[in-house]
Amino acid sequence: MKKKIVTLFLSAMMATSMLAVPAMADDATDAEAVAEEATDEAEEEAAEDVEEDAAEAAEDAADAIDLEGIDVENATIGISIYKFDDNFMTLYRTELVRYLTEDLGFNEKNITVTDGKNDQAEQTNQINNFITAGVDVMILNLVQSSSAPQVTDLCNEAGIPVVYINRQPEESESDRWAEEGIKATYVGADARQSGTFQGEEILETANGGDINGDGKVSYIMVQGDPENIDAQYRTEYSVKALTDAGVEVEELLLQRGDWDQAKGQQIVQDALTQFGDQIEVVFCNNDAMALGALQSIQAAGRVVNEDIYLVGVDALTDALQNIQDGNMTGTVFNDHIGQSHAAVEMAVKFLKDEEVAPVNMVDYIKATSENAADILALLQ
Ligand code: BGC
């Protein structure tokens, strides 16, 4: 439901910015007044539309997934998250359970959610317990995506379908599911898109990221867990967006921060000591690390959007708030609502013995000062 509202609202906002351009105002003051009025009106209309659509979307939510033939009261679902102590996956898992129970009417007692504690052996034990308990379907956020072949075989032998989320198994593995008719699928988002959006946000700044005007963009890269394809692609494609636009770049540092705020803070603190004013852009593979980076940037007396740029991914509430306040340049909305709903949709298809594509991707959305407040309002 929320997913639909976000999409509708963002299109309304795009219409708003088009309306805000005064066609033929005589002077700047008139133009500003016209623009302001147009913006106010359009914003009000957009807000009203959103409210109306929200009611409509609520009704649609149950229809979005065809539950016919599913015994929602008795269906059992095993969910394991790579670790509970991850900001983004906490939002994701909360929405996943909320959607299953509140919107679709699954019985909370039959949904088990376990904490993989960032330990694959521990998580594999949990999966074995799900098998012993005979759950109807699993939704798994693997600690190590490289363990997908082994886990898939375990589930397949037990006749239990599995929906992998967030950490994408190798392509050869998802190809195997399709070839061998194994009931496994992946739901995620294409991290090349989020990386590209980060690069574009830098290109869209007043000086295209070249604050000191030396003809190149000097950056540091704070990477997530490098085993993770999201971390690899975001790292590569954020920079590629700059080089594809013909911009010269200089990498001062690339360091893994494992998606973790405290690590992000430490890495950026050390980098600022080592490279000082040379750093023009701080790329972080996620918002948790970007929020850590921001603490160090502010402690060092640097000012985001004036003498340094900072971008993340996820659109955590704190990040959106900081973008709105001018303390972060941008982020990318990693749509945990769309992804969790799509994961449920695939699980339900498996329960109904329907065909499921091996890979299912949900779009990212660019989040900058232009739409941060709107996304924030909708996520709260
Ligand atoms: C998110 C990170 C998160 C990671 C967990 C990524 O898609 O951007 O914030 O830590 O998934 O696997």
Image: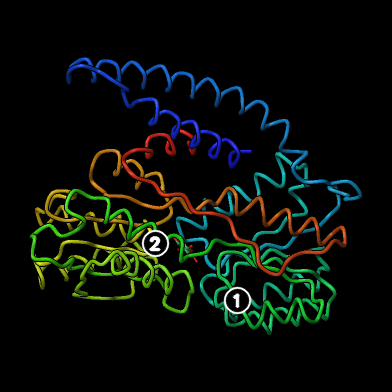
Q: Which residue in the structure is indicated by mark 1?
A: 169
Is residue 229 found left or right of 98 in the rendered image?
left
On residue 233, which mark appears?
A: none
User: Which residue corresponds to the image point at 22% horizontal and 75% vertical from the top-left?
Assistant: 253
Mark sitting earlier along the chain (1/2):
1
Q: Amino acid at mark 1?
A: Pro
| x and y percentages locating residue 37 in the rendered image | 33, 15
Q: Nearer the viewer, residue 17 or 280?
A: 17
Q: Would residue 156 be found to the left or right of residue 69 on screen?
A: left
Q: Position of residue 58 (x, y in %)?
A: 68, 31
Q: Position of residue 30 (x, y in %)?
A: 22, 15
Measured as percent of width and height from the top left, residue 275 is found at 10, 71
Whether 153 is drawn above or below 367: the answer is below
Q: Tell me the quadrant of the picture where the N terminus can be found.
A: top right
Secondary structure under tag 2 reads helix
The residue carrying mark 2 has its beta carbon less than 8 Å from ligand 1: no
| As drawn, 16 above or below 353 | above
- Residue 173 figure quarter: bottom right
Q: Viewer-proximal residue, 179 or 14?
A: 14
Q: Residue 235 lies in what quarter of the image?
A: bottom left
| Residue closest to the eye, 337 or 318 | 337
Q: Please tell me which residue lies in front, 373 or 86.
A: 373
Q: Residue at x 71, y 54 (%)?
A: 344
Label 1 vs label 2: CA separation? 21 Å
Quarter of the rendering containing residue 261: bottom left
Question: Which amino acid, by three-letter code, is at mark 2?
Answer: Thr
Q: Looking at the picture, does residue 160 appear above or below residue 89?
A: below
Q: Secondary structure at mark 1?
A: loop
Which residue is denoted by mark 2 in the rendering? 196
Position of 328 with respect to 237 (left or right) is left
